[in-house]
Image: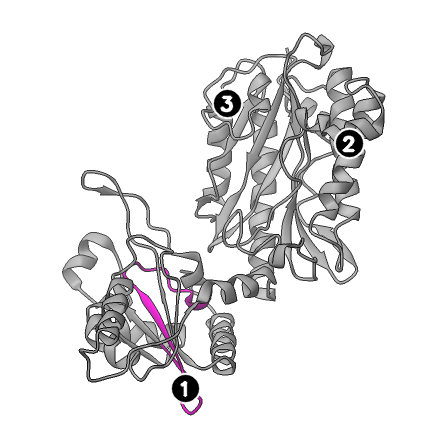
Amino acid sequence: MSTLFDPAPFRARRARVLEHMQKNGGGVALVATAPERMRNRETAYAYRFDSYFHYLTGFAEPQATLVLIADNNNPRSILFCREKNAERETWEGFRFGPEAAAAQFAFDEAYACNELAERLPALIAGGQPLWCAFGHEDEASGFEALCAALIAVRRNGRAGWCAPATLHDIRHLLDEMRLIKDEAELALMRRAGAIARDAHIRAMRATRPGRYEFEIEAELLHAFRAAGATGPAYTSIVASGANACTLHYVANDRQMHAGELLLIDAGCELEGYASDITRTFPVSGRFSPAQRAIYELVLAMQHAAARATRPGASFDAPHEAAVDTLIDGLMDLKLLTGSRAEIVDTKRWQRFYMHRTGHWLGRDVHDVGAYRPHDAPRTLAAGMTLTIEPGCYIRAAADIDPAFHDIGIRIEDDALVTPDGCQLYTADTPKTVAEIETLMQSAQPTS
């Protein structure tokens, strides 16, 4: 954790949750962090906290649970966490312990995690509502099973106290909160975007015929960690040649050849927030005419989608703008034939563009928030963050001009919906044909 950690944004989020709970019957909320997961035998994966839990606490240690008490007279937040243990810290590293955690992270109370089972019955007694993310983590710290058992006792009439009669899924509230980013979140996301930008530039400079995809992936990983990011926000896609037409290609083991394109979809995670950038560029430094034509089309799709991204617009509007641009471009290139109305009606364009134009971005690279609440597209609002990532993928086929065979292009930037439109805050990653070719040519070794 940064030595400059500021608990204020986390305390403010907890206060908002407590206020909402108080307006909706009060009660008790429980949010557990993620469990530790074994990689193989006695080796664990590097620990990554639960996004909901960290959003409210900033606390990154495992075996922790947040309890929020929405008492009108005494609203408070309680952390249950690991105790200080000199022996375990020798093996596993520093632990805050309850006392230091309460002070550092601005909790009203904190206790050892092994006290949760003992204290929980009293915390949830009285029939007050229980706010919980039931089923969110199959192996969550055990309080879900305990809550269920306590409620069952009440229903069976064998208890002398009144357990919760009303259950709420707290994720619905937190999802809506997380859709609109506060200033602390936006600052981290911009930093994550800048680190990813520099990593993509480093990867472009390192690319040349004869190298392998995994060598370029290594350049990305180096840049992420060297700049202070935790690592990649997701498995990096480094896809050359025909591999670029596989949307989630992650083998990254092919040797690259002159005349091909390389598609890199990679972002980093910084203090729990993700960046997500895709760039496509020629391995040998210059686009062929066919590659350039498709690249310019995808770039035009992104420009159209960005113009459609603004407060009050439908979440579907950027995708619809991108598809309209794609259809016109493919018709001009004779890759789609027939009437425009028929192409739209039959969705033949989906042969070349089979994914959506964006997704929410934040603590999770595909962040929370319903795209169609109440069975209608979400209306965009200032403070929302999303990707804008159109693409075009042309697999080799008998009815396709060979010049276009195995061209896969995606261009992706991270976007903030502003009060008057949209800001692509990763757009300074080289993106135009001229920018890419200039950078690639400057990095190519001289013969």
The residue sitting at 73% across, 19% down in the picture is 291
Could you say whether the residue bearing mark 3 is in a helix, strand or loop?
helix
57 sits to left or right of 97 = right
Residue 190 versus residue 212 in the image, above or below: below
When asked about the image quadrant of residue 163, the answer is bottom left
Q: In the rendered image, which residue does mark 2 sit on?
A: 344
Which SS class for mark 1?
A: loop
Image point (35%, 60%), residue name: 33
| In this rendering, the label closer to the viewer, 2 or 3 | 2
Residue under the point 53% across and 47% down: 366
Q: Is residue 263 above or below residue 188?
A: above
Q: Which residue is mark 3?
A: 213
Residue 376 image offset from top left, x and y in percent = 66, 54
Q: Using the image, determine if residue 323 lies above or below residue 342.
A: below
Residue type (three-letter) at the residue carrying disc 2: Val
Q: Which residue is mark 1?
A: 71
Crowd around label 2: few <14 · some 14–19 · many ≥20 (10 Å): some
Q: Nearer the viewer, mark 1 or mark 2?
A: 2
The answer to if 385 sits in the magenta stretch is no
Locate residue 299, reporting x and y percent. Answer: 75, 34
